[in-house]
Amino acid sequence: MAPGTRDLQLTAARAASTEDDAGAGEEVRLLEEYLEEEVINSSKIPANLRRIQVRVTGMTCAACSNSVEAALSGLDGVAKASVALLQNKADVVFDPSLVKDEDIKNAVEDAGFEAEIIPEPSTSHAKPNGTLTGQFTIGGMTCAACVNSVEGILRTLPGVKRAVVALATSLGEVEYDPTIVSKDDIVNAIEDAGFEASFVQSYEQDKIILGVLGVSSELDVQQLEEILCNLKGVRQFHFDRILKEVEIVFDPEVLGSRSLVDAIEGESSAKLKLVVKNPYTRMASKDLQESSDMLKLFAASFFLSVPVIFMRLVCPHIPILYSLLLRRCGPFQMGDWLKWALVTIVQFVIGKRFYVAAGRALRNGSTNMDVLVALGTSASYFYSVYALLYGAVTGFWSPTYFETSAMLITFVLLGKYLETVAKGKTSDAIKKLVELAPATATLLLKDKEGKIVGERQIDALLIQPGDVLKVLPGAKVPVDGVVAWGSSHVNESMVTGESASVFKEVNSSVIGGTINLHGLLHIRAMKVGSNTVLSQIISLVETAQMSKAPIQKFADYIASVFVPTVVSMAFVTLLCWYFAGVLGAYPEAWLPENGSHFVFALMFAISVVVIACPCALGLATPTAVMVSTGVGASNGVLIKGGDALERAQKIKYVIFDKTGTLTQGKATVTDAKVFTGMDRGQFLTLVASAEANSEHPLGKAILEYARHFHFFDQSSGATKDGKNYSIETKYPGWLLDVSDFSAVPGKGVKCFTDGKQVLVGNRKLLTESGVVIPNHAENFVVELEESAKTGILVAYNNVLIGVIGIADPLKREATVVIEGLKKMGVCPVMVTGDNWRTARAVAKEVGIQDVRAEVMPAGKADVIHSFQKGGSVVAMVGDGINDSPALAAADVGMAIGAGTDIAIEAADFVLMRNNLEDVITAIDLSRKTFSRIRLNYVFAMAYNVVAIPVAAGVFFPWLRITLPPWLAGACMALSSVSVVCSSLLLRRYRTPRLTTILEITIE
């Protein structure tokens, strides 16, 4: 027999020996928890204690693991004992002076299980401090109560910092300390609570799942395992014979993913062909499988239930068939036997999942939809069995309700199937993003001298940093990188939202998933795997879909107390109708034929139990948030979560940074006036020399203007071969030598040339340096500022020699967007570090009345706080880099024009395009999303509010209206489906355009 995963003796990871290795070694790898030989950092255990692991054989359920854990914990000297059922392992921390290894082994064996002490490894893998974030699939959740239960379990685990569970995606995201709790511990905790769990992925790169082609016999499996055992750097592996997939944990410091694949294929003489499995694709296939399984269950239940309904409703009108059903066969009629047999299959074979899930919930001390379904169907089924047996014994035959159980289960399964289909539609955004990445890439092979000697087709998931890839016209760029050779236009709209193609040449950056339009490109890979822009966008969307809006937390609380309330309500309904009948409060004519008061009351109680299921309540918010975040991502608006959406729909003030937000951020010199006898060319050379070392946009604009003045016949820094060169490289010697250069924040720059000081900046810089500003120069600066331009004063040897005027044009859509915000009831505010005259001129041009000028970057947060004092929700729109403190201080931070820099922690919304229309889109989408959520809650609660009184028989005395249990099940299913379909309507959302923005009004 092939060795199992736990029994493999694999090579230990080598120590990092280079700086790169050390850097990689500092990463905390989530999947190292798979290592059999891992030793937890001894600093976490007191010096007098020791930790060992024990392999336990014979455990079959949680009760077994509890027995082992109790036996170990009962030993004198054992400080802590935890047992992992699925891993068949026990982890024991003990005092070696009080208890020995053999005592621990004996304790397990005395409990009725086999035990083996796992040998301690010779190599210790210490983990650095820090937390990890892992993603887990969680199966078996049916409503908000399940979500609350799983989250509560995870948050109580030692070492878990944060746990978020999403019902709509069946995913959980857990942030934890790997030195305290492992990935397997988290999976075990979820499974011990009665749910299915499996690890999906992390941001680490030391695990790969490969599909294996060419395995036709056990000899092939043994060959594969032998190759992996002998491959240096492979830590652990497991081959799934059913799926024909091998899961490999490897040391990325020793072995790369492509080297791993090449080694396996090479050692097998190309007999084995490996295909990398994308984790997102695997998750999508699981969703399809779940939907397919639910459809099969529904179909089976439907075909078994139809004969039961047929016998009840149709056969009495067909004498021949009805006489056959009435024929006695033993103690019962033939029809009773058939109903009992068919419904028993539906109840306990097809409906087994409800009993299993209900048992899990009850063991965990919670209640959910499965409890209600199991309770309702069991009541009708077991009463029907009782009625048959009672009739056979006494001769008094009461009506049976087998069809109630069958139809109830059938309708519930139909609802669950439609729900899984609809939920699958809500995750289309991630699927579309995943599809943007190409499946394969063309790797260029080079010799030692760097010459291309050939090319090779590889899986895109096996690309490594530094690889040079060939991208043909019309093909997708495989990963993030830079152009190593060639030039072309690239369509980046699918990632950034920008519709216009972008020209790319040597050293230009490219984004994975974008389309090369025309020329041939050679791309050098820079970022791969989870570091690419596309992966980060997917991660952002996933994070948003995992988050919970405050309104959802309230709904979860309602759902958690709703089920016990409903069960109590059903019990009260049963008692009220039963005792009312016994006391003669209603006539006997109300009773069904051959029925009793108890049966009459029981049907009302079952209907109440079924109709009141809170499934739809738990789906109302997360499904809408999922669709909304997907719609936003497809329009270049990345939303960080449901809480951001909830705050955004309440925005009262939007504060705009001026430079680069309201303006284009492309400063140009419009005026240059000299007040002394200095030649204009000398003046510009002097100013350009001072600004040559400045990184400020205004300094670069002055430098470019001066270069154009001297070299007006040349293009700006470009040569015919398409390569860029600096001004100093292309035109050496035209700038003056400067010394003692210094940039004064918010004021300008200082330097010396030929022993004389040069000052370039605003009034403060010159006055603080003792330079007098003449009236005619001051008047010229004022004239510039009133024209929405910035005046830059230049002093040489303590004398003002000239002024330069610089303008930063407004974005074309700025005025319309500001007017649109006003129509939406949002008050726009502009904040800038520029002077008051320029600020007022720009604000007047764009239509903003409230202006805050001469504000340093650190002071923007204070401006935001001043607007928040009245309890108003304030949004800040900035570039996401210089404005990070202000973005963090605002209730809603919007980083605009982020482009590829999407990992901005301070922002709640990342607007990929440099377009102010997306501010309108973000607010409008938020409002429409929460309008949809409110409508969803109406759908979710309307059925309960209207149907519960009907189900309980409140209107029966006057209107003779009843809600049979099977119809109650149909209504319950319809409520969930209607909520999900309502959320799906958000997919029809269209962003407001410039021509329609002014039509927006306050809702």
Image (tube, grey):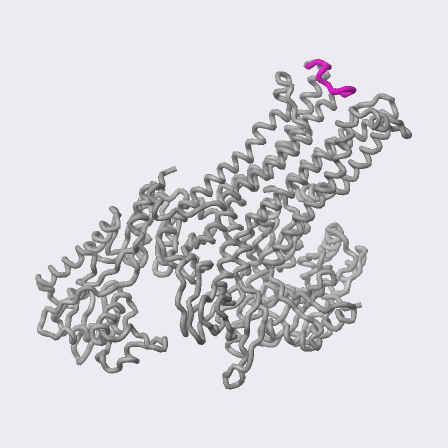
Q: Residue at x 28, y 73 (%)?
A: 715
Which residue is outermost to the right? 330
- Answer with the quarter of the image where residue 913 lies: bottom left
Relative side of 281 to 60, left or right: left
Question: Which residue is nearer to you in this view: 57 or 793?
Answer: 793
Residue 478 in picture, x, y percent from top left: 52, 67
Q: Residue at x 52, y 81 (%)?
A: 452
Question: Which residue is nearer to you in this view: 952 or 361?
Answer: 952
Q: Residue at x 21, y 79 (%)?
A: 736
- Answer with the quarter of the image where residue 245 lies: bottom right
- Whether the magenta-drawn stretch holds residue 40 is answered as no
- Using the image, determine if residue 418 lies above or below residue 489: above
Which residue is outermost to the bottom? 449
Instruction: Write the start and end of the magenta stretch as one range.
Output: 586-596
Q: Does the rendering let one see residue 858?
A: yes
Q: Residue at x 9, y 64 (%)?
A: 774
Residue 213 in picture, x, y percent from top left: 70, 67
